[in-house]
Amino acid sequence: MGSISNTLFLVFLIFVSCMDRYTSIDFQGHRGARGLMPENSIPAFQKAVELGVSTLEMDVVITGDGQVLVSHEPYMNGLFCLDPEGKVIPDARQMEYNIYQMSIEEVRRYDCGSKPHPDFPDQINMKVVKPLLSEVFNVIEPITNEIRYNIEIKSEPRWDGEYHPEPAEFSKLVYDVIDGRIDWSRVTIQSFDFRILRYFHVAYPNVPLAVLVENDQSIEENLKSLGFYPAIYSCDYVLLARSDVDSLHELGIRVIPWTVNDKEEMDKLINWGVDGIITDYPNKM
């Protein structure tokens, strides 16, 4: 009996250890719950909260009248958006539908949810408009004031002045919408544009930052290029090795890879010790 009891106790300890590891993971709903609902929409964020994510991941751009809009592209993506007349936007012309040249009233005339997304067959389609960041807060905060927000500033040097403001102005517009409304302990600012992160690091040192990476440079090269250690290193999960997780942790940097939609890959990364997972399918978590 003693041997059996010891075995059962060992199994119990392993179970508790695994549960602790999973419950400490920052599960993030990518663009809300893109695999299930239209991306970066109010219904997608509501669905992600319903499924128990700890963080809502989203992207922001700027409208022509200076509003902070939740959108992955600074234009109307013809893959899933319809024009104000309900017609398909040709892929070759989609960048002509420049959000930085539209007022918020013009933006609201586009339907970015009714058209089936070819990459997400399980997505429920419905008519939705791109929401303001402030509107997301207005809807989500009454549901839960414990959720965290991972907000990507969509900026590229080649788009300065044409599809978005310069980094300083862009950063301030986003900062002003958040500051005083959401405690900064619940917000992360992320970007592929190192200029944005460097600006925040100097102008708003209290803001947690995540560097987004999709290049094939080493971690050391990327951190050297950035010029400081961010709170989070967030790369395409296929670029990540187990040794990278250990190396980043030794530097005091958390590791949250994207976009992980396969359950086995999630389990593998969690066993490696990552601090979070960004996924299109919060239901798989």
Image (spheres, grey):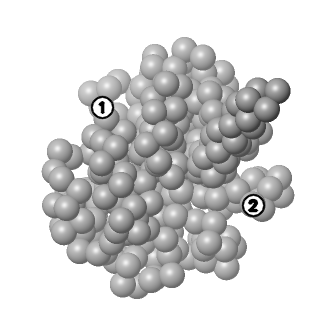
Kind of element beneath mark 2: loop
Q: Is residue 164 above or below residue 93?
A: below
Asked whether residue 3 is in view, the answer is yes
Kind of element beneath mark 1: helix
Residue 157 falls left or right of residue 174: left
Give how far apart the Cα atoms at labels 1 and 2 are. 41 Å
Q: Nearer the viewer, residue 51 or 23?
A: 23
Q: Position of residue 269 (x, y in %)?
A: 45, 38
Residue at position x 34%, y 47% from top? 235
| Quadrant of the rendering where the C terminus is positioned | top right
Residue at position x 30%, y 42% from top? 241
Q: Position of residue 118 (x, y in %)?
A: 46, 16
| Quadrant of the rendering where the N terminus is positioned | top right
- Judging by the rendered image, the residue that carries numbered circle 2 is 146
Going from N to C along the chain, the mark reached first, 1 or 2, is: 1
Q: Nearer the viewer, residue 273 or 108?
A: 273
